[in-house]
Image (cartoon, rainbow, N blue to C red):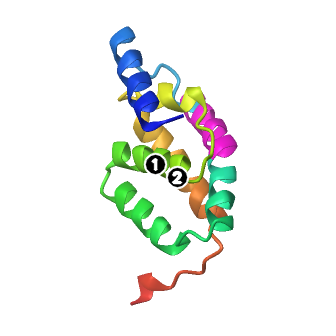
Amino acid sequence: MTTYEFIDCILNIKKEKNKTKIENETQANEVATLISGQFIIPLFFKLQENDYDMITIKQHLESLYDNENHFGLVYFIFILANAADVIVPHIFNEMCANDVFVPILSGAIIDDWLDLDFTNDNSDDE
């Protein structure tokens, strides 16, 4: 999916749907975890395989999450996927287009990313 297609998809979904309230937060977390797991794990390993700077990516993702820039985090993940030629699932786009779900998706992504991180980054000690 190109960046143009991603933007077009987000805008079309936003036009079609109003903000969806989260009726069952546990279920929303489970959906976000499933989406993230199916998408983030292959993305992580593809980036690693292509010799991306995984420490810097991790630090950037942590910074975005810690500063509650959840939209920035999910959009950065899309940019990474696009750069690594990893297919973005349509349900990811749908969650990105819903302001209520983005923080939940962002949390699932950062959890998966940190679970996968094997870089032993000690920069927090500096």
Q: Is residue 18 above or below residue 88?
A: above
Q: Quadrant of residue 50?
A: bottom right
Q: Secondary structure at mark 2?
A: helix
Q: Which residue is mark 2?
A: 83
Which amino acid type corresponds to the residue marked 2 in the rendered image? Ala
Residue 33 lies left or right of residue 22; in this view the side is right
Judged by its main secondary structure, the magenta piece is helix
Q: Considering only vertical position in the picture, is 52 above or below 83?
A: below
Residue sitting nearer the eye, 72 or 9: 9
Where residue 108 appears, x then y in whole percent?
A: 55, 46
Q: Position of residue 121 (x, y in %)?
A: 53, 81
Q: Residue type at mark 1?
A: Ile
Secondary structure category for the residue under label 1: helix
Asked if disc 1 and disc 2 are in contact, CB closer than 8 Å, the reply is: yes
Separation of marks 1 and 2 at Cα, in angstroms: 6 Å
Mark 2 crowd level (few <14, some 14–19, many ≥20, 10 Å Cα)? few
Label for residue 20? none
> What residue is at 66 percent from the left and 63 percent from the top?
116
> Which residue, given by chain and number where applicable, does mark 1 sit on?
79
Give above or below for 50 relative to 91.
below
Quarter of the rendering occupied by the N terminus: top right
81 sits left or right of 98 in the view: right
Nearer-the-camera pick, 83 or 113: 83
Q: Is residue 122 visible?
A: yes
Residue 20 in view here? no
Q: Which residues are magenta?
A: 27-39
> Residue 10: x percent and y percent?
40, 25
